[in-house]
Image: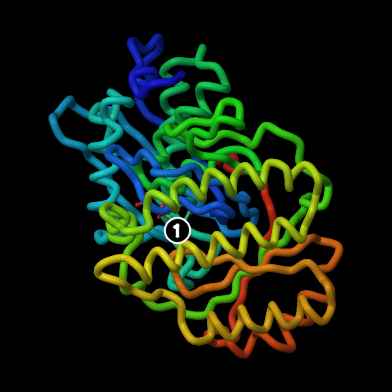
Amino acid sequence: MFSANDFIPTTYSHSIEGGNFKWSAPSNIALVKYWGKKDNQIPANPSVSFTLNNCKTITKLAFAKKEKQDVFSFDLLFEGKPKEDFKPKIQKFLERIEIYLPFLKDYHFTIDTENTFPHSSGIASSASGMAAIAMNFMSLEKALNPSMTEEHFYQKASFLARLGSGSACRSVKGSVVVWGNQDNIKGSSDLFGVEFPNAIHESFNNFQDTILLVDKGEKQVSSTVGHDLMHNHPYAERRFVQAHENLDKLIAIFESGDLEEFIKVVESEALTLHAMMMTSMPYFILMKPNTLQIINAIWKFRNETKIPVCFTLDAGANVHVLYPENVSAAVLQFIKDELVGFCQNGQYICDEIGNGASSIDN
Ligand code: DP6
C-alpha cells in the first residue's frame, strides 16, 4: 500500500539551471462519479472515467534558477497573456505540493497555458489544466533525478494533479482510469489514478463523447462547495456504497461489452450526482431546462431506434452524449436534427476516448 510519504523525494542526483518543458493533458468524463471528499483530497468513493482526446490543456513550463527565497515565484500566462485571476489557484497548488517537490522555491517559473476548447464553454479546465502542470513539474523532477522509473513518474504526476483538483488525477495516463480504493481493482488507490487493469471489450474502442454546450455561463455552485455539502448529507453514506457497487458492475460490463447494462449504470450515476445536489442543504440545481429536453430526446431516440446511445452529466448543465463508434453517423445526424437546438448558440464539441497526457517537443 502506498502512502503520501512515498512521494517525498530524498536527494536529487543532478542539478539544472533552467530550461522548459511542454505537455498536453486531456479532460476526462466520469462514468462513476467522484462527489464528496475527505481531507487532503481523498475521495469519499472511487470513480472511473473515460479519458478524452480533443479537449485538452497545453502548458509550457519555463524555469530558471533563482536565489533561494522563502516564496514561490511564477508568472501565469493564458494564451500568452498574463492572467492574474488564475494565480491564486496555482499559488495554493504550489503550497500543497511543495513537500513533494522540494525544489519549487529554487526556480522562477513561467507557466503558459491554453485550452483546445473555448474558455467559456462551461467545460471545466481544472482537470486538464492541473494534470498538464503536474506533468511539467514531473519532467523537471525527472531531470533532477534521471533514474526515476516511468511508473513512479506517472504515479506521482497523478498524485500531484489530484492535489490540484481531484478529477485531474484521472487525466494523466490511460483510456479508462480508476481513482479510489476498490477491492476488486488491483492497484487502485485513493492517492492517484490508475489505468483500469482488467479486460475491456472492443465495443468500447474509440467510444465517442459529443459534448452539448447547454449553458456556458459561470456555475452558481462550484464543485468545491458541492463536495463539501456531502458532509452531513442525509444520503451520503448510501451513495458512497452505491458508487462501489456501480464500479463493480462496470468491471463486468467492460469485460462483456453489454451496452444495455453500461447505459443503466452511466445514466443512473449522472442522475444520482445531480440528485445529491438537489438533496443537499442548501440544495441547488445545475441542470437547465434544455438539459432535461436533451435527456428526454435521447431516451425517445434510443427507444425508437435501439441505438445504444446514452448521456452523462458533469457538475453543470452540459450533456455528454456517449456512444460506440459504429453508430456515429446515425447519432451525429440525430444530434444535428434534434439536439443542436437545445445548445447555446448551437454549439457542441465532438470528442472521443483518448490516451492521456503527452509530452510536446519545443
Ligand atoms: C462532478 O475534481 O472538479 O466532475 O477536487 O474540488 O477540484 P475538486 O473537484 P473536481 O470534481 C469533479 C466532480 C465531477 C465528477 C467526477 O469528475 O468524477
Q: Is residue 175 visible?
A: yes
Above or below — where is 112 with respect to 343?
above
Q: Judge left or right: residue 150 versus residue 68.
A: right
Give the residue displayed 24% in from the left and 45% down from the top: 91
Counting from the top left corner in percent of width and height, residue 151 is at: 56, 22
Q: Judge left or right: residue 276 versus residue 49.
A: left
For this rendering, which residue is in front, 239 or 96? 239
Counting from the top left corner in percent of width and height, residue 34 is at: 45, 50
Counting from the top left corner in percent of width and height, residue 282 is at: 25, 70
Q: Is residue 360 visible?
A: no
Q: Judge left or right: residue 80 versus residue 272.
A: left
Give the residue displayed 59% in from the left and 54% down from the top: 31
Q: Residue furthest left?
A: 70
In terms of image quadrants, where is residue 12? top left
Above or below — where is 4 with respect to 322?
above
Residue indicated by mark 1:
125
In this picture the colour scheme is rainbow
The image shows a total of numbered marks equal to 1
Give the residue displayed 56% in from the left and 51% down from the top: 26
How many other residues sit within 10 Å of disc 1, few (<14), some (14-19) or many (≥20)?
A: many
Counting from the top left corner in percent of width and height, residue 199 is at: 76, 36
Q: Secondary structure at mark 1?
A: loop
Above or below — where is 70 with respect to 336?
above
